[in-house]
Amino acid sequence: MNRIVVAVDGSVGVSAREFAAGWVQEPDAVEAGPAVAEELPEGAFLPGVTELVVVPLAVNLAAAVVYDVVRRVVSRASRRPREVSEIEIAEVTTAGGDRVIVVRAKRDLS
């Protein structure tokens, strides 16, 4: 079964548990499948990421829909006010078919 795996960097101000709780408030997200926060050993995935949100896909979502849902969930769940344009969302598909989405604070290059 294919999954969406969401890694939310701590710089975003949303924990994996908060993201998973916000997922159930989005109709498009609920249609895709339930979100569960899973703990990881420190440094097992990305530096600073100790939890992932895993969504076993019941239906496939287009990338644009996933990005919109992720932005809405982050905006709603953020502990500190943040414009959604201040986050970056990157997606990679693994050889096993999982869609890995990384959400982090946007950093300006100057």
Image: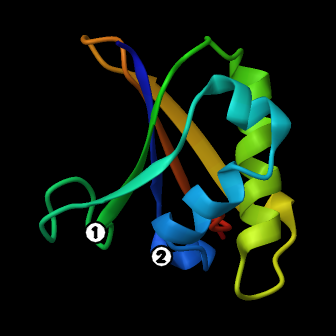
- For residue 33, the mark is none
Q: Residue at x 67, y 50 (%)?
A: 23
Report if residue 101 is visible in the image. yes
Q: Amino acid at mark 1?
A: Thr
Q: Which residue is mark 1?
A: 50
Image spot of residue 29 (x, y percent): 71, 35
Q: Residues within 10 Å of mark 1 (few under 14, many from 20)?
A: many
Which image quarter: residue 98? top left
Q: How far apart in space, not on screen, are marks 2 and 1 (Cα)?
A: 9 Å
Q: Secondary structure at mark 1?
A: loop
Q: Amino acid at mark 2?
A: Gly
Q: Which residue is mark 2?
A: 10
Tell which of 92 and 14 is nearer to you: 14
Report if residue 104 is visible in the image. no
Labelled pair 2, 1 in contact (Cβ < 8 Å): no
On screen, residue 87 versus residue 18, left or right, reads right
Image spot of residue 106 (x, y percent): 66, 63
